[in-house]
Image (tube, grey):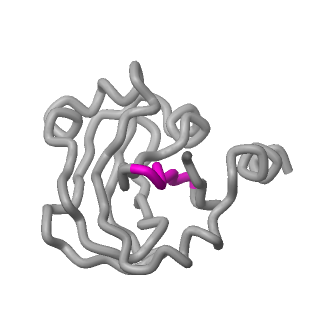
Amino acid sequence: MKKFAKTHEWINTENGEVGITENAIEQLGDIVFLELPEAGKEVTKDSPIAVVESVKAASDIYSPVSGKILEKNEDLENAPEELNEKPTSWLFKIELAQDTELEDLLDEEQYLQEIEN
């Protein structure tokens, strides 16, 4: 199940995969660069963890939860334009430090209502 942050990141609660929403990718336009966190890095909820650049702008990606980075999607980092074609791709995997942080995130319906407002 995916949970969403108001800052347009999502986390798959079953496997720890984290990505950015299709809405965010549409707003950014054509992605040309990704800088993803290294495995082993400790992160805190809502802290900037990665960078995505498009032809329009550069934007921080925030960690939706606290934890430890297990793996980054190197294929995507080496070919960031693939994110335009596969917007549901994961960027990195995280091991949650506290499951209770998931309670602060939105389900898909709540997220869609949030971006419509």
25 is within the stretch colored magenta: no
Which region of the structure is painted magenta?
8-14
Question: Is 46 positioned to the left or the right of 17 in the image?
Answer: right
Q: Residue at x 44, y 65 (%)?
A: 62
13 is within the stretch colored magenta: yes
Question: Is 21 positioned to the left or the right of 55 in the image?
Answer: right
Q: Could you say which is closer to the camera, residue 33 or residue 74?
A: 74
Position of residue 109 measured from the top left corner of the image (x, y, whole percent): 77, 45
Name the residue at the front extreme.
14
Name the residue at the top extreme.
85
Q: Could you say which is closer to the camera, residue 3 or residue 87?
A: 3
Position of residue 9 measured from the top left corner of the image (x, y, whole percent): 51, 53
Residue 54 to residue 100: above or below: above
Position of residue 91 measured from the top left corner of the image (x, y, whole percent): 31, 46
Question: Is 26 positioned to the left or the right of 31 in the image?
Answer: right
Q: Could you say which is closer to the camera, residue 51 or residue 20?
A: 20
Q: Which residue is drawn at 42% across and 66% down?
A: 63
Residue 99 to residue 93: above or below: below
Q: How many marks?
A: 0
Residue 45: name its quadrant: bottom left
Q: Which residue is drawn at 41% across and 60% down?
A: 60
Residue 27: name its quadrant: top right
Residue 36 to residue 88: above or below: below
Q: Could you say which is closer to the camera, residue 68 or residue 46?
A: 68
Position of residue 79 measured from the top left corner of the image (x, y, whole percent): 19, 29
Residue 87 to residue 85: above or below: below
Q: Residue at x 85, y 51 (%)?
A: 117
